[in-house]
Image (spheres, helix red, strand yellow):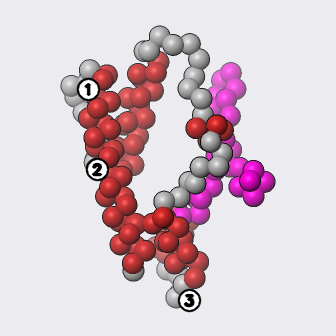
Amino acid sequence: MASSKKLLETFGNVRDMQIELYQNLKFLAGFKESNLKSSNVVDLTAECLNISQQLVLNSGKIGMPEPLIASNANLDPLTDAQKQALIAIQETNEFLTSTDEASKAVCNQANQEYRRVRSHSEETFEVLDVKDNK
């Protein structure tokens, strides 16, 4: 219960920061209209990414930004709240319902690292085995 509360608080803080980030990016891009479907963290993040990609493309710079994961492989991908939630899920003796399975899948997904693979015609993402990279 405490880990769930901490996770919700963390997502609330992330949402507040994402709203401010969205407002700043919108201002920098000169956008007046909003394309948000909702103000949850997923939709906010997707729209921030969309605006930032447009800013990069229109910046006049040649090349692409350096990938964060490649340059900072030792960065921890989980917040303290996510770690607590993951531990709580792994240590629970309760019967897992379908909702619990979904939560566990999300936590496991958050713990994986990805590598962006680009070819001439497409861009894909590959799951990296964290044990092999550390």
| Magenta residue span | 107-134
- SS assignment at label 2: helix
Q: CA distance from mark 2 to mark 1?
A: 17 Å
- What is the distance, in whole Å, between disc 2 and disc 3 at their CAs? 34 Å
Residue assigned mark 1:
27
Q: Position of residue 54 (x, y in %)?
A: 42, 23
Residue 108 image point, x, y percent: 59, 63
Q: Choose the circle earlier in sequence order: 2 or 3.
A: 2
Q: Is residue 3 magenta?
A: no
> Is 71 above or below relative to 87?
above
Disc 3 crowd, CA 10 A, few/some/many (<14, 14-19, 20+): few
Q: Which residue: 55% across, 75% down? A: 87
Q: Is residue 121 magenta?
A: yes
Query: Residue 120 is drawn in which quadrant?
Result: top right
- Closest to the camera, between mark 2 and mark 3, is 2
* Residue type marked 2: Asp
Asked which secondary structure carries label 1, the reply is helix
For label 2, the residue is 16
| Residue identifier under label 3 | 93
